[in-house]
Amino acid sequence: MNRKLFFSLLFFLCILCTTVYTQAWHSSPYMKAKPDSTGIYNFYDVQNAFQLYEKNNEANNELYKNETETDEGEFENYAQYKRWEWFSEQRVFPTGKFPAQEFISNEYQKFIDNYSTTTGRNNNLKTASNTWVNLSSPNMPVAAYGGMGRINCMAFMPGNSNTIFIGAACGGVWKSTNGGQTWTVLNTDQLPSLSITSICIDPINTNNIYLATGDNFTGIAGSLKPGHYSAGVFKSNDGGQTWVLAGMPSLQSQMFIPQQMIIDPVTPSILLMASNTGIWKTINSGATWTLQQAGFLQHRI
């Protein structure tokens, strides 16, 4: 796989995109039941369902009854769908299948190995030493878009409140060792998802850090508005310098969105995670997860 194609696929999982919200075209009769009962839809399944929904409803003007602040010829959530369609169509396989997280990770490792061999450069490509400072004002400019630099979660180092970790909506994990005066990006730039929704630190061995990837933009009125679907849970055994998948690998088409993860302070091999599919539990540090309670969870735990 060439470098351009790889980073296109990596970008697909890492960069915040406006995704298709749960709408009428996701339901019968527009979204047809899968004959193999897998329930996993590809890009063209969603696209065909949307087009059929639009065609069947535009004649009687049903789509425009709740139209607010949309351009002529559009209806509610039309623009969000079209952004998702344009972005996704360029990054799926010819069959319409979304690339799996494991595929992206494997292709990335191949790129790293080849990059090191052909250039003679260090293949770590770490960014842990990068430090960012405000160029002008720490305040958001007037009339700027709300949510710029949005922070999803924060965790303090057990026993040291001056060491803080924050997870960004699509900016990875950042660390401060001086109570938030300065920040460095933890080595998360190469994860298959830069959206971080929850951080857990082992209180017994603080080198063990867990990240739940994904971004629930908002969870109100019983529906999620995902900024980015999850690529799974990742774990570091060295304080955040390297990361491995710690279970719950997810395809974007599965629309899995964690909301919060907590760790047992007495037995840190046990973690609970609330998500849009229910409450999940691991008793072996993320090697396997089991569903404890199914159903949409609207609030954080």
Image: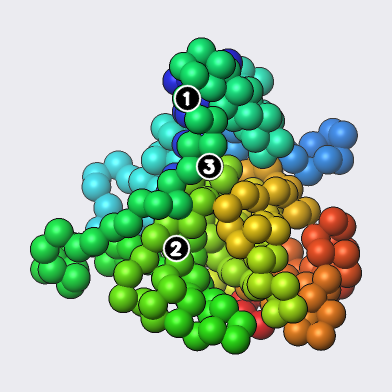
Image check: 80 left or right of 234?
left
x, y (%) of residue 5?
50, 21
Toward the viewer: 221 or 246? 246
Q: Earlier in the sequence, mark 2 or mark 3?
A: 2
- Residue 190, which numbered label? 3
Image check: 219 left or right of 290?
left
Q: Earlier in the sequence, mark 3 or mark 1?
A: 1
Would you say the residues marked 2 and 1 are in contact, meaning their CB atoms lie under 8 Å apart? no
Q: Residues within 10 Å of mark 3 (few under 14, many from 20)?
A: some
x, y (%) of residue 174?
44, 63
Q: State the CA–CA distance, disc 3 to disc 1.
A: 17 Å
Q: Secondary structure at mark 1?
A: loop
| Residue 19 visible | no
Q: Residues within 10 Å of mark 2 (few under 14, many from 20)?
A: many
Image check: 144 left or right of 276?
left
Residue pictured at 76% horizontal, 84% vertical: 265
Question: From the viewer's perspective, is the residue at label 2 or at label 1 nearer?
Answer: 1
Toward the viewer: 48 or 223? 223
The colour scheme used here is: rainbow
Which residue is labeled 2 in the image?
174
Q: Secondary structure at mark 3?
A: loop
x, y (%) of residue 82?
41, 39
Amino acid beneath label 2: Trp
Which residue is labeled 1 in the image?
121
Q: Residues within 10 Å of mark 1 (few under 14, many from 20)?
A: few
Amino acid beneath label 1: Arg
Image check: 103 left or right of 37?
left
Q: State the CA–CA distance, disc 2 to disc 3.
A: 14 Å
Toward the viewer: 106 or 221? 106
The relative height of residue 224 versus residue 58 in the rendered view (above or below) is: below
Residue pictured at 56% horizontal, 16% vertical: 117
The relative height of residue 123 versus residue 75 in the rendered view (above or below) is: above
